[in-house]
Amino acid sequence: MDLWQEIHALSVSIRRNQEETLAEIRALREELQRETRTRLLERVFLVLAFIVGLIGWVRP
């Protein structure tokens, strides 16, 4: 292999590695968004249950 072929092979390798890293980052970001939505929904349901409990306690 001459120098240019080695440089090209290295460049291709770096590009593939970068694409894999970006794909992993994207997957982690999506997972974080799902977890954030789940936590938000849990909090909303908790608040709703609390409000319904208060209404039931005030109006038996």
Image: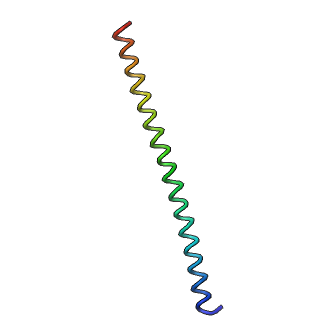
**Measured from the top left, where is residue 13 in percent x and y?**
59, 76
**Measured from the top left, where is residue 40 in percent x and y?**
43, 37
Judge whether 53 appears above or below 60 on screen. below
Q: Residue at x 52, y 63 (%)?
A: 22
Q: Residue at x 36, y 8 (%)?
A: 59
**Measured from the top left, where is residue 32 in percent x and y?**
48, 48
Q: Residue at x 55, y 73 (%)?
A: 15
Judge whether 1 appears above or below 46 on screen. below
Q: Residue at x 53, y 64 (%)?
A: 21
Quadrant of residue 52 within the rendered picture: top left
Q: Quadrant of the C terminus?
A: top left
Q: Quadrant of the N terminus?
A: bottom right
Direction right: furthest residue: 1
Direction left: furthest residue: 58
Quadrant of residue 45 within the rendered picture: top left
Judge whether 49 appears above or below 40 on screen. above
Q: Is residue 7 left or right of residue 60?
A: right
**Measured from the top left, where is residue 12 in percent x and y?**
59, 77
Direction top: furthest residue: 60
